[in-house]
Amino acid sequence: MTSLAPVTSDAVPAADTVAAGLPRERGGWWHDLVCPTHGTELSHAGIPGPVPPAGGVRCPHGCAVDTEPVRGAWLVLSHQAWARRARVLAHRAARTGDEATRAEAVRLLVAYADVYAEVTGGGEHERAQDWMLRGRLFHQALTDAIWAVSVGHAVWSLAEADPGRAGDLAPVLGMLDATAEAARAARGRLVADGKFTSNYTAWLNAAGRVCSRAAALVRGEGAAPAVADDEWLAGEHGQLAHALAASTRGGWEWEASTYYHGFVVRAYLLSLRGTAPAELPAAARDRLVAMVDVLAGLATDGGVLPSVHDGPYSRPALALEWTELAALADGFVADAGLAAVAAHARTEAAAGDGDDEPTDGLEDELRRTVPGWFAGPPLAVARAPRPAVTVDEEVGIAVLRGAGIHAVLDHGPHGAGHGHHDKLALALFGRSTPWQPDPGQVPYGHPAWRAHYASAAAHPVVRVDDADPAEATGRLLARTDRSLTVEVRGDATSWYDGARAVRHVVLGDGYLLDVAHARADRPRRLTLGLRPDVPLGVRADADVVRTAWRGAEALDGVHAARAAGRDGAVPVRAVVVPGPGPADDPQRERAHVDWAAEAATSATWVSVFQADAEARDGGADVTRVELDAAEVRVHRADGAVDVHPLPAELAGSTTDEGATA
């Protein structure tokens, strides 16, 4: 929930000027900052500031929205931006010793302590929704914790850099103590409800640890306790226990959401300030390294982090969080592998909110922090070369890299409340071009668009009767160093009752081969969707369909399909329909392809995707593709034919589906 908040310190504002700029109201739920008409996130104009813009908050499509939920959401981002501003100023003052910057940071923090006491005096937020873990300054305790981490780190930097003047910060002690107490109480409620693995816990622990340590520095209490003696870190419900409980052995956060994965990793690294990475308990230390490696392995060569499950598709303010995480990760583990992610995120963040706002310098301050964010050097970890195919079997996320194509195959558990109906979805990227991405998610305050972006129709998946399936868990059937085969089975409580789908993906010689197959226990409409975020050309040539995916990088597809019903072969037709693009702007129209067979009991779709010759490092163009019961044949322009035997789970299943040219 970061906003873009440029920081300048050319002049030191008076205390009353600082106080006048702070919001003097509680914030709401940031997910309500969404246009009810268009589903787009509303503008951040005026942030940081005391009140939302007069006349309402603007939508990119021209609407002005002035409702209580939108006002509350705007206030969330303004409060968070002020806290981030204090943090950047404090880090900068601690690093440079600049008196004007220090004075501005102190005045901002002291003014905020007055505001906090004034607006949270009544305890928990009375307007929070019933399902929420209630906060004090905001609807949610999670939002309070995120805000408190920024404030706590600002105080920490100032007090640590100049202990002799830590007394200047005594007025903030009540705020720090209250936020730490609130974090402990909220964490206790989560634990009591059996929700310890919630991503909230990571931020509550971070807030408790950071605010407690900041308060200790202001009080002159000396050295921090050892990690083993710090309850916020090493306690039964502390940060290190959470990292192990809320992630897989391979390092994925258990919900398998790119956004929430980065969200908790950032909280972990923020909470570990002043510790030596090498001195952490081995299990937790290694898991944190694995969690960083997950992001490095998921990212494309151009630094794009594919959005899996809930999370923004593209959001400049989120890009600032990725740059922050990359800086922290580089301090924790050598060669963290996120340089391309940080570079891409800087470019995205610099685009701002349509106002050409600059980034605020937090990443730079973190990389230059004195005496360093961590108390020891980054971990030296020996890493083998990244293979062409990687899989985390616990969350069911696989990445295939080759021939200029970066593919992500999602086949595991649903992902709980942040999951989507994306079982067996195949996302396709170039170095930095999102040919067929996961669409991400809109701010949650728009229920209709949120439901759409979680639906099967929004994803490149097999659908049965154009309905949404029940939540389901797929499984890995087979893998080699160049291929994967996965499946999902339906029953009365999972996916589509009486149906099954298999997807077999192969890194070929200069192309990616994708074979999707579906079977049903009775005649049904079986559909495979293509969901681009680039201009897509589609041309049918007899039984072969050709696609041209255009963007900064080009992708070409050659496709064929066959299907059968109770009385033999049935046609499979590719229909192009206009549809909404990814969730950053539901009004951006894209060409959707639904490749459907009516009254079918089985269907098989074969696609061969090729990047341009330079990206794929040569290899003759693919001209056509053939399928029979035992194999797929890929024909090349130079006359060569590549034969791919179908895996046992598919071999023979297409016997009744008719021929393909």
Image: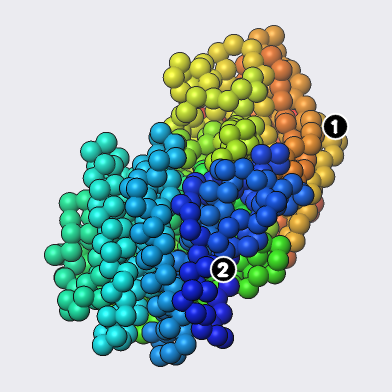
Q: For mark 1, does the 10 Å Cα neighbourhood hold few (<14), some (14 to 19), or many (20 or more) residues?
A: few
Q: Which residue is mark 1?
A: 542
Q: For mark 2, does the 10 Å Cα neighbourhood hold few (<14), some (14 to 19), or many (20 or more) residues?
A: many
Residue drawn at the location 22% of the way across and 51% of the way down: 237
Query: At which x and y percent is residue 415?
Result: 44, 38
Query: At which x and y percent is residue 17?
Result: 52, 74
Tell me which corner region of the image, top left, top right, bottom left or bottom right, holds residue 613. Answer: bottom right
Between 74 and 276, the one lying in front of the other is: 74
Looking at the rendered structure, the number of numbered marks drawn on it comes to 2
Task: Residue type at mark 2: give it.
Answer: Ala
For label 2, the SS is: loop
Q: Which residue is mark 2?
A: 5
For residue 622, side relative to residue 506 (left or right): right
Identify the image quadrant of the C terminus.
top right
Q: Is residue 547 above or below residue 289?
A: above
The answer for how far apart the CA atoms under marks 2 and 1 are is 56 Å
Badge 2 or badge 1: first in the primary sequence: 2
